[in-house]
Amino acid sequence: MDDGWFGNKYPRIQDNSSLGDWVVDTNKLPNGIQGLCDEAKKNGIKFGIWIEPEMTNTTSELYEQHPEYVLRASNRDLNLNGARGGTQLVLDMANPKVQDLVFQVVDTLLAKYPEIAYIKWDSNSAIINHGSQYLTADNQSHHFIDYHKGFAKTLDRIRAKYTDVVIQDCASGGGRANWGYLPWFDEFWVSDNTDALQRVYMQWGTSHFFPAVAMASHISNAPNHQTFRTVPLKYRTDVAMSGRLGMEIQPKIMSDEEKDQTRKAIAQYKEVRPVVQQGDLYRLLSPYDKKGAASLMYVSPDKDEAVYFWWKTETFVNQQLPRVPMAGLDPDKVYVVTELNRIDNEPLSYEGKEFTGRFLMANGLEMPLDHNVDYHKRNDWASRVLRLQAK
């Protein structure tokens, strides 16, 4: 359940009110959060919820009752210039009362609704008002340090009580893609830009520092909401599968064929998830080399299984792209090749065939520059995901 489910005196209608008032808006959810949990269970899925507990709005019951809880210099006017919705403020996590408040937001939800399996913890405002109303004048210079210490203390409390809830770290996109937060968060949101072509580049860079298991990578709608580029579902899926696959797509706008394609992709991803999320990453062809394609692969520690990704990044008539040798395999093992997310009318020529690791690392496999689909389904995009399993 995304933003907007809360607010009593001030219902969350736009992004300019209600943060801090974490009570259900029963006009929107007449059956409350429990109703959503029950529906999720009925449909065989887990339930997750969006919260932004470090924030409030000037239009909120919390701010009306406790204006001293927000970050601001005591001798300066409140600055709302550039604040989200013109009203959003950051709570002072250096203040123990605020720490208790933030803990209670999470604790109340998870204690009342133990079915909640996932939290998207958002942070959509930079610190515009510098200073703490809690700290003494002598300690103002390091209020950022005290903010972080209070934040860490609160997260420690949450994780001590709720070890199994998956929590995503999001900050107006990827503002908190930070090693320091990974002890408390299971994954982070790389960026609000989910355009698959840009994600090839973005996730290539991100994966230099972070493992795939922490890199949320979602299939989203087309046209993309930021770039307005229309990327086929196959390509979007193949990019998302190279990270922590998620779905951020509206089923109501999907065709039956797309729904079937997505069901199969999710099932196949679950089969290779241990390799992608826990395997060793090998970079094969960087998109930044501008050779028309990008490629990488994950290999299990025992080298018994690998997942190879290849994406075409541009299209020109009579284009020639390099064959990409693989890496990280056992040269003496024999691997069976299976394509995942196949949309072609006919399988690839090497589907189900066997190759030694030595051959694959010396030669690679030829990637067709388009897909063998019916004429009215053709487009200029191409991507491949290959699963390699040792005999």
Image (spheres, helix red, strand yellow):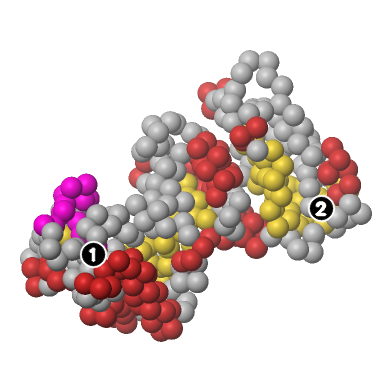
Question: Mark 1 packing: few (<14 Cα in 10 Å), some, or many (20+)?
Answer: many
Task: Give the residue at the far right of this rendering.
Answer: 332
Q: Is residue 132 magenta?
A: no
Q: Does 217 sit above or below residue 27?
A: above
Q: Is residue 82 left or right of residue 337?
A: left
- The answer to whether residue 300 shows anywhere in this view is yes
Which of these two is toward me, 340 or 190? Answer: 190
Q: Is residue 87 magenta?
A: yes
Disc 1 or 2, which lies upstream in sequence?
1
Task: Give the residue at the far front of this rendering.
Answer: 138
- Specify the label residue 329 is tagged with: 2
Which residue is labeled 1 in the image? Answer: 131
The residue at 59%/58% (across/down) is: 211
Q: Position of residue 159 (x, y in %)?
A: 43, 79
Q: Position of residue 302 (x, y in %)?
A: 79, 64
The residue at 50%/51% (across/down) is: 217
Task: Give the image quarter of residue 162.
Answer: bottom left
Which of these two is toward me, 318 or 140? Answer: 140
Q: Position of residue 109 (x, y in %)?
A: 29, 76
Q: Amino acid at mark 1?
A: Gly
- Asked if labels 2 and 1 touch by Cβ distance under 8 angstroms, the answer is no
Q: Point out the stretch of residues depicted in magenta.
A: 77-91
- The answer to whether residue 151 shows anywhere in this view is no
Q: Amino acid at mark 2?
A: Leu
Q: Position of residue 108 (x, y in %)?
A: 27, 79
- Image quarter (top left, top right, bottom left or bottom right) of the N terminus: bottom left
Q: Is residue 66 left or right of residue 49?
A: left
Tell me the element at label 1. Answer: loop
